[in-house]
Amino acid sequence: IAGYTNAGKSSLLNALCKPYTTYVEDKLFATLDTTTRNISLAKNQNVLITDTVGFIKNLPHDLVASFRSTFEEVSHSNLIIILVDSSSNRSVIKEHIDTINSTLNSLDIEVKHQLLVFNKIDRIKNKEKIAYLKKKYPESVFVSAKNHIMIEELKKNIFDVINKDIQTSIVRIPHSKSFILDEIYKTFTVNNRSEEYDYVEIEISGSPEDIHKFDEYVV
């Protein structure tokens, strides 16, 4: 989750993951370290989601190193959720989105997918503003992390985006190499498993890159 400080990143993490233990306070840099949690999106599919240090204009020099290091987590992600405070005025919203994207580019962070999420929709009383944002950012999701509004819809969007690149294969692991099974279960979603005389046959789902590591066992 990437976004400006006070956009509600920790609140969103709390809404997506239970129990609610991430530190939340309405001040700059309430989160100065990354917090990673496991969330369940569907049967047999869990993902890790990380809350990052908040963006801020003219970042103080003594925080630059901390700010950069936290985004090392982002560089290994399948998806970046760009979180924006929808209660900000339109020009600020655009500025924040542009700054986040330019900063990620400057850090040479390339992630396959991004999902723009507008938080704090409970604070918007003007329906025209929501209509404007939906028209300008048609692929975005609107939530209230604090009031748990549209969180399940957001989970569905995360599920759909992550599974765009999922590949399903069947691998056969000889009993003599059963030690590999632990890594299989850690790396992939296991859809089916059958025990045969000489091997274990497993249907797995995961990224093409991870499946490629087990090419010699793919049927």
Image (tube, rainbow, N blue to C red):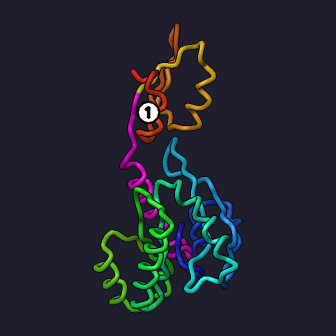
Residue at the extreme top of the image, as rendered: 197
Q: Tell which of 144 and 60 is nearer to you.
A: 60
* Amino acid of disc 1: His
From this view, report whether residue 57 is shown above or below residue 115: below
Question: Residue under circle 1?
Answer: 212
Residue drawn 66% across and 71% down? 65
Where is residue 78 shown, x and y percent of the image?
A: 47, 54
* Mark 1, secondary structure of its residue: helix
Q: Is residue 127 magenta?
A: no
| Count of numbered marks | 1
Question: What range is drawn magenta here?
Answer: 143-169
The quadrant holding residue 137 is bottom left
From this view, report whether residue 43 is shown above or below residue 211: below
Q: Quadrant of the C terminus?
A: top left
Q: Tell which of 173 and 216 is nearer to you.
A: 216
Where is residue 103 shown, x and y percent of the image?
A: 49, 73
Q: Is residue 168 magenta?
A: yes
Instruction: Report whether 68 appears left or right of 122.
Output: right
Where is residue 138 shown, x and y percent of the image?
A: 30, 73
Q: Quadrant of the N terminus?
A: bottom right
Instruction: Report whether 127 appears left or right of 31.
Output: left
Q: Tell which of 185 and 120 is nearer to you.
A: 185
Q: Residues within 10 Å of mark 1 (few under 14, many from 20)?
A: few
Residue drawn 54% across and 51% down? 47
Residue drawn 44% across and 68% down? 105
Where is residue 198 shown, x and y percent of the image?
A: 52, 8
